[in-house]
């Protein structure tokens, strides 16, 4: 059944996820250049997310991971990426659908994107998980990147 509106937010979110996929593909091929590093936030309860039971119990809704010094086996596919990280010196393999992403930032360039997990509305946006001294996962500092949101362009 056709709808009488265009879901612009969905189109923009999908385009931004595609940009993240392309950025990660470049890193997969050539590694992280210079001081670049990424904070990637995603919904851990999104279908298709794979992580250990230990991590899932600690972060049942959302987590922010860091791709910087200690990550391995980054593999980018069309709809998801796979990466290995160390959490408290325990290696973990993560599988993350791009549709589960809620944020992406490169603090070295003050670049950031923020979007909702697919099927999520502004009213049910979850808080970002806080993490203490865990290699591979941290809470994204608000001052570290300029976050671009669709709300900045919407009429109030």
Image: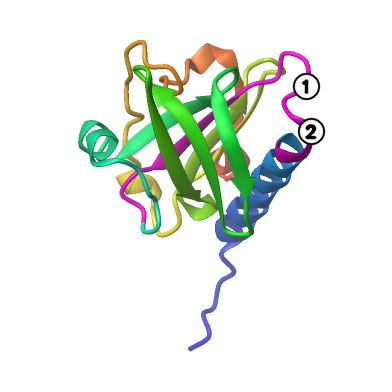
* Residue 32 in sight in this render: yes
38, 2: nearer the viewer: 38
Residue at image point 46% right, 23% down: 136
In percent of width and height, residue 25 lies at 72, 44
Residue 113 located left or right of residue 36: left
Label 2, residues with CA under 10 Å away: few <14, some 14-19, many ≥20:
few
In reply to whether residue 34 is colored magenta, the answer given is yes
In the picture as drawn, the residue positioned furthest to the left comes out as 57
Residue 108 located left or right of residue 135: right
Q: Secondary structure at mark 1?
A: loop
Q: Are marks 1 and 2 in contact (CB under 8 Å)?
A: yes
The residue range painted magenta reads 28-46
128, 75: nearer the viewer: 75
Residue 4 located left or right of residue 58: right
* Residue 156 in sight in this render: no
In percent of width and height, residue 126 lies at 32, 38
Q: Secondary structure at mark 2?
A: helix
Residue 117 located left or right of residue 16: left
In reply to whether residue 32 is colored magenta, the answer given is yes
In percent of width and height, residue 81 lies at 56, 48
Q: Which residue is mark 1?
A: 33
């Amino acid at each position: 059944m056709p709808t009488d509106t265009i879901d612009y937010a969905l189109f923009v979110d999908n385009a931004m996820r595609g940009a993240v996929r392309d950025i990660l593909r470049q890193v997969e091929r050539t590694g992280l250049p210079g001081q670049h590093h990424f904070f990637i936030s995603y919904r851990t309860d999104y279908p298709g997310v794979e992580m250990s039971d230990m991590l899932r119990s600690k972060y049942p809704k959302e987590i922010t991971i860091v791709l910087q010094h200690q990550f391995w086996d980054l593999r980018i596919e069309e709809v998801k990426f796979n990466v290995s990280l160390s959490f408290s010196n325990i290696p973990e393999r993560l599988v993350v659908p791009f549709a589960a992403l809620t944020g992406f930032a490169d603090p070295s360039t003050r670049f950031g994107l923020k979007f909702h997990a697919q099927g999520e509305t502004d009213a049910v946006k979850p808080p970002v998980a806080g993490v203490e001294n865990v290699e591979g996962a941290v809470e994204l500092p608000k001052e570290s990147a300029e976050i671009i949101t669709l709300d900045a362009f919407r009429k109030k």
